Structures are given as structure tokens and as C-alpha cells.
Image: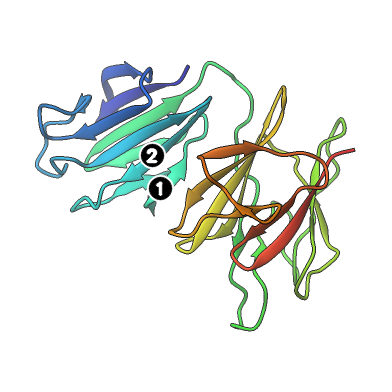
């Protein structure tokens, strides 16, 4: 179960356990988490719990919602993320101490004609960047179309975010029971095996084909 630790000027002022499917944040007294500050909108943001995942979505607030210094619209929270609303810092902590670092994201290439490119932890190069070998036998995704067709990227972290920020973003999360694919951002939903994602998330199986932001990828798990 995750929790939020709210601090102001380095002083912790409250802790809130995330127990509901939706937890609202804002200045108005009817919010689940009330932050009484003029920099905070009446209905500022909402946290949505999907299984063990927690997403935060900005509700078109006046001053925006930031995660680790970057403005977001909707994003999957990872362990130790810091949400910034006005002068308040809200740290998200999970009971699981696993490394929830987001490893890569597909971003538009330098030219409009180029396909999206992964921005991995290694120095980038043209097309999709590779990731180093992982311990154990993690799954991977293989690009099926575009200039990067045939490139395979190993899913070395617990959470991997893919897509075009501001257009269409999804996440692949490794769990003890297997991998889960979830919609994070974008008006159009990603497609798995020719069917648009109907819920917030769906389990992935070997051979599944994902279509996201114009890129087709196959999920491979040996």
C-alpha cells in the first residue's frame, strides 16, 4: 500500500495512506487531501489506484502539478517520486522497496519523418537504443515497424514507460505474477493484439503485439 508524505519547507506536516480508488487533492475542504494554500487550486489533482499502481492526474490546475521538477498531466507514480504542488512537496512511498525507476521513454526523433526513439540509460544512438544485460531472464519488446524495425530492448527495470509525451504514453510494469501494460496519457488508447485497451491495464503474454504512438512492438518473454 502506498502513502504520501507532505512537507513544507522541509518539515513534514502530514502523512496520508492511499486506500481509495480515487484520492483527490486540492484547496477545497471536500478533498481527500486538503492543502490550504492559494497556490493550490480548489480541485488540483487526483490519485487513481489501479491494482498496485497509482497514477496522478492534474485537473487543469492554475499552477500545475510537477513530479521531480517536471510538469505532468497524468503519470504513473514510482517509489520515492516527489510531487510538487505550489510550495508543498509530496513524497510517494510504497511498502515495496524495489527499484521503480522508469528506464526509458520513446520520444520524437529530430525529424518528423523519423520514428520515436528510446531514450535509455546508455548514451543514445539512432533509432532505438539498447539496454545492458539484466540479471535473471527479463522480458523484452521488439520493434516491428519503421526504421528501427527488428530492434529489441530488454525490460530491465520494474517500470518501463514508452510513448510520445503529450501524445500517447503507456507503462509496462513487472510484477511477481508477470508483466502488466497500462495506459498513462493520451486521448487515444493503445492497442494490444488489434483491440484498444478497454480498462486501465491488461496482463501481457509472450507474442502480444502493442501499437502505441504509431509504433508496433511485440512483447517477448522466454
Q: Upstream in the sequence, badge 2 or badge 1?
A: 2
* Callout 1 secondary element: strand
Taking 139 as reference, is 185 left or right?
left
- Element type where label 2 sits in the image: strand
Name the residue nearer the viewer: 153 or 6: 153
Residue designated by label 1: 74
| Residue 157: percent from left, percent from top | 70, 38
Counting other residues with Cα less than 10 Å from the Cα at mark 2, is it few (<14), some (14-19), or many (20 or more)? Answer: many
Q: Please indicate, yes or no, whether residue 123 appears anywhere in the rendered image.
A: no
Towards the viewer: 57 or 72:
57
Identified at 77% across, 70% down, the residue is 145
Instruction: Point out the residue furthest to the front here.
Output: 195
Q: Give the labeled residue for mark 2.
A: 56
Are the two marked residues, 2 and 1, in contact with CB atoms closer than 8 angstroms? yes
Q: In the drawing, does residue 26 fall left or right of residue 94? A: left
Q: Image height check: is 50 above or below 18?
A: below
Q: Residues within 10 Å of mark 1 (few under 14, many from 20)?
A: many
Residue 39 placement: quadrant: top left
Q: Where's residue 194, x and y in %?
A: 67, 56
Q: Residue at x 78, y 75 (%)?
A: 147
Image position of 201 with respect to 215: above or below: above
Question: At which x and y percent is residue 75?
Answer: 45, 45
Q: Residue at 56% across / 50% down in the picture? A: 170
Image position of 128 (left or right of 188): right
Amino acid at each position: 500500500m502506498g502513502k504520501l508524505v507532505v512537507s513544507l519547507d522541509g518539515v513534514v506536516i502530514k502523512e496520508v495512506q492511499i486506500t481509495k480508488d480515487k484520492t483527490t487533492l486540492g484547496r477545497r475542504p471536500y478533498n481527500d487531501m486538503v492543502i490550504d494554500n492559494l497556490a493550490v487550486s480548489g480541485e488540483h489533482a487526483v490519485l487513481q489506484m489501479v491494482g498496485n499502481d497509482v497514477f496522478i492526474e492534474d485537473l487543469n490546475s492554475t499552477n500545475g502539478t510537477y513530479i521531480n521538477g517536471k510538469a505532468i498531466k497524468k503519470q504513473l507514480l514510482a517509489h520515492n517520486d516527489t510531487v510538487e504542488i505550489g510550495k508543498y512537496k509530496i513524497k510517494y512511498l510504497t511498502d515495496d522497496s524495489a527499484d521503480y525507476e522508469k528506464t526509458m521513454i520513446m520520444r520524437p526523433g529530430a525529424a518528423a519523418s523519423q520514428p520515436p526513439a528510446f531514450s535509455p540509460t546508455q548514451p543514445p544512438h539512432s533509432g532505438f537504443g539498447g539496454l545492458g544485460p539484466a540479471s535473471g531472464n527479463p522480458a523484452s519488446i521488439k520493434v516491428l515497424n519503421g526504421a528501427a524495425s527488428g530492434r529489441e530492448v530488454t525490460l530491465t527495470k520494474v517500470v518501463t514507460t514508452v510513448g510520445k509525451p503529450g501524445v500517447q504514453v503507456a507503462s509496462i510494469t513487472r510484477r511477481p505474477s508477470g508483466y502488466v501494460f497500462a495506459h498513462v496519457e493520451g486521448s487515444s488508447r493503445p492497442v494490444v493484439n488489434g483491440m484498444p485497451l478497454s480498462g486501465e491495464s491488461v496482463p501481457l503474454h509472450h507474442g502480444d503485439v502493442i501499437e502505441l504512438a504509431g509504433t508496433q512492438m511485440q512483447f517477448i518473454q522466454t
